[in-house]
Amino acid sequence: MTVKIAPSVLSSDFARLGAELAAVEAAGGDWIHIDIMDGHFVPNITFGPAVVKAMRPHTKLPFDVHLMIEPADPFLAAFADAGADVISVHKEGGAHVHRSLQVIRSLGKKAGVVLNPGTDVGGLEYMLDEIDLVLVMSVNPGFGGQAFIPAVVEKVKKVKALIGDRPIHIEIDGGVSTANAGLLARAGADVLVAGTSVFKGGTEADYRRNIQALRDSL
C-alpha cells in the first residue's frame, strides 16, 4: 500500500499561498488538503471558492477539499469549478449526505464522506457505492495544531473492515506526526493529512525533510 501525504494549507503562510503550494509539491507532497470552514458548522473561517481558484495555477497536485460547512450542497458546484479534485462532506453537513455524494460525482469529482471523532461508522455501509474516500477526523474540526485522539486508530480499523476490497481511500486528518503515522497506516489509512508536521520550519528544504520523515516513519 502506498500512503499519500497531503499537506494541509491551513498550516501554511497565507500571505505566500502560491509559493507554499509550489514548495510542498517540490518537497514531495502527493495531494493538497484544503480545509473550508464557515464559522457556523465549525468555530473558524478559512477559504471560499475564489481562494481555491486562485491557488489552482500554483501546483499540479490534486486538490483535496474538505467542506466543514453547513449546508454544503449549495457550494458543491462552486468548489468543483474552482479546481477541486476530491470534495468531502460531513455526515452532519446536510439533511441528505447520500444525495450530496451523488452530486459531487455528477460534477466529475471524487466524493468523500467525513466522520467526526464523535460520529459513529454506522450508516457508512449504505454509502460505499457512492464514495471514493472516507475522511476520519482524529481531532475535532475547526483548528489546526490539535492533539491526536488515539481512539481513532480503532475507528480506522472498523472503517477498513467495512470497505473491504473496494477501491476507497481512508484519509486521516488531525495531529498526524511521525509518532502515529505508521500506526495509522497499519490500521488501514492510505492518505495522511499533515499540517504542522509538514510546514514547520517554513522553507522548502524543511518541508522536504518533514515529508521524508513522515514517509520514513511508515
Image: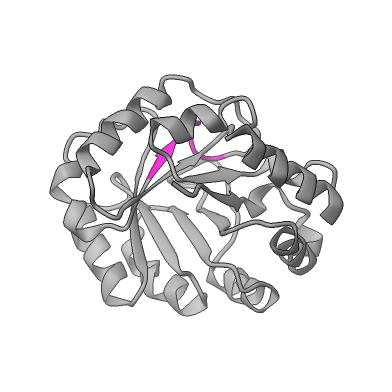
The reply, left or right, for residue 70 in relation to residue 53 is: left
Q: Please, is residue 50 above or below residue 3 in the view?
A: below
Among the 4 quarters of the image, the one containing residue 51: bottom right
Residue 96 visible to the viewer: no
Among the 4 quarters of the image, the one containing residue 87: bottom left
x and y, in percent, of residue 197 in the image = 70, 38
Q: Please, is residue 34 above or below residue 54 in the view?
A: above
x and y, in percent, of residue 119 in the image = 31, 32
Count of numbered labels shown in the rendering? 0
The reply, left or right, for residue 115 in relation to residue 52 is: left
In this view of the protein, which residue sits in the foreground, 159 or 14? 159
Residue 63 sits inside the magenta stretch: no
x and y, in percent, of residue 68 in the image = 45, 50
* Residue drawn at the location 79% of the way across and 66% of the way down: 19
x and y, in percent, of residue 70 in the image = 37, 53
Residue 195 visible to the viewer: yes
The image quadrant where one finds the C terminus is: top right
Q: Which residues are drawn in magenta?
A: 135-142
Among the 4 quarters of the image, the one containing residue 144: top right
Residue 136 sits inside the magenta stretch: yes
* Residue drawn at the location 34% of the way across and 55% of the way down: 112
Q: Farthest left residue?
A: 126
Q: Farthest top residue?
A: 151
